[in-house]
Image (cartoon, rainbow, N blue to C red):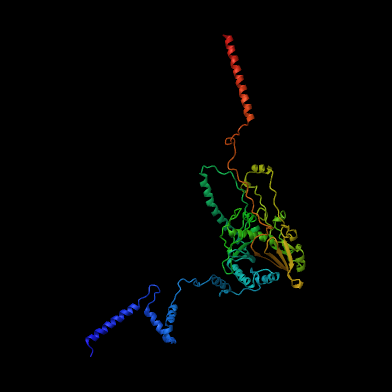
Amino acid sequence: MRTPEHHDHRRRSGQLAASFKAFVSKSSTKSHLNLYDHLTRLLVKVMDEHPDNVVDVIEDMSRDVKRELFQDKQSTLRDFPQTTVAEQLAEQQRLLFLRPEDAEHEDELGETPLPNVSEICFFLEQAGVGLSREEMQKIFLALKQLIESQALMRCRLWGKILGTESSYIVAEAEYREGEDEEEQNTEEAVEEDEREPQSQENEENEVDLLPQSTYKPPAQVPKEGIGKGANKYVYFVCKEPGLPWVKLPSVTPAQITVARQMRKFFTGRLDTPIVSYPPFPGNEANYLRAQIARISAGTQVSPQGLFQAVEEEGDEEDEAQQDNYEVNPDFEAFSAVEMAESLSTWVHHVQHILRQGRCTWVNMAVNPEEDASEDGEAEEKEEEPDEPEPEVGPPLLSPLSQDAEMFNTPPWTSKISSSLTYHHAIAVLRSNLWPGAYAYACGKKFENFYVGWGLKYAGEGYSPPVPPPPEKEYPSGPEITETLDPSLEEEQALKEALEEQQAAQEAMEASAEEDEEDDD
């Protein structure tokens, strides 16, 4: 039979055990571990492994248990993102390969504005230029998406312009009849909205009584309408196939003129401001459009005789302004050897851009508002001489053999794709003035393609234009001009003249006094 002392001993032992367990369960302030859990894991490890001479390796096993619980909270490894940029692009490009369920079967025999990019890719491979087959196939599907969304009448792959951050895939398109007028009205409305704040600022500045500058900027050359000259076609760009297409704005003569005087790489962001001298009027989208217009005017070529100019009413007097042409049904194709040996078998089918920045010259000496003046004023203006001489460029469909050299470099280099099999070879043309511009011809099939940085060949080196001389700060006049100090000879002559004048005056006074005394 247990005595009360025995029960007290058990109760004290239980209290001591609980107190000791609480002590060994206390976590460390350094490692945040406790002895109770550590011994538990250590004994479990001993029972699982049954090592020999356990008393000798117990310290190493204890160290291994602690090492297994180590957590590196300052790791240099980063968490792998859930979706990368490549995966997002792949998701966008996956939509190109999907066919809508409600899409009808296309008429295989009907005409389509979609170009045969696969055929173009094949010929470009023969020429040794172009993009990869995979990228060309994606671009083909992206062009199909563009045509369906914009309802274009004509579309082709213009090329690819490289950039420092990303590149631009450029598509050349043509609106249907009537849609270009709506687009032009939209652009004119946007330009008027931009001019209104400027006119309000000018009215506020008129209140200021400070002297105004007498400098008058030259008259702004009007831009050509949509469907004419440098704005004959509209251009869409995208960074990668599957990404949204962005329509570039119309180009102005001022943008083309400044683009000729500067050299700047593209970044791949259309909203990037252009910091240059002379100052460029616009952002990278406008600069890209200006370079596309310059490249197209200088490198868009075709076999001679394939196109013929369209004669319209009023064009007989000025053939240089003709910008319309049509396919010649009686065209007889040249052989690849003939086109590779002679530049006379190639012609330009895009209008030349004049120094004014337009394809057609406009007389800036005549103010359009003054044309509606009275007959008498008009007759007086006709008598005024010094009319500017109209600028005329080379006519449309002029042969490449007439192109001038620059920096002792021929403008074109021609070759044949294969010197072993002439019957199946194609003629290839490369521009030396615009590195990256190529053209090929095979019978009645031809194409122009550009892939490069969008810069013209500058010869030995590029030199920026010299700034103009500074304007006069204020008009010079006698009221603000400081007089020059007299020389010693001038001072001596003035002194002698004053002495002579004083002597003559004294003599006159003396004679007057003598006359008065005689009268008295």
- Residue 3 picture quarter: bottom left
Residue for point 31% across, 81% down: 17
Count how many numbered circles sit on residues in the image.
0
Q: Which residue reaches farthest top?
A: 520
Asked if one can make out residue 444 in the rendered structure from this viewpoint, the answer is no
Residue 492 left/right relative to 48: right
Q: Which residue reaches farthest bottom?
A: 1
Residue 424 left/right relative to 64: right
Up the image or down, 495 lies above or below 162; here it is: above
Quadrant of the rendering where the N terminus is positioned: bottom left
Quadrant of the rendering where the C terminus is positioned: top right
Find residue 200 and report its horizontal and vertical position in percent: 52, 49
Q: Which residue reaches farthest front?
A: 56
Find residue 160 and report its horizontal and vertical position in percent: 63, 65
- Residue 450 picture quarter: bottom right
- Pick the residue in front: 371 or 87: 87
Residue for point 65% across, 74% down: 108
Asked if one can make out residue 494 in the rendered structure from this viewpoint, the answer is yes
- Pick the residue in front: 215 or 23: 23
- Pick the residue in front: 336 or 378: 336
- Pick the residue in front: 144 or 346: 346
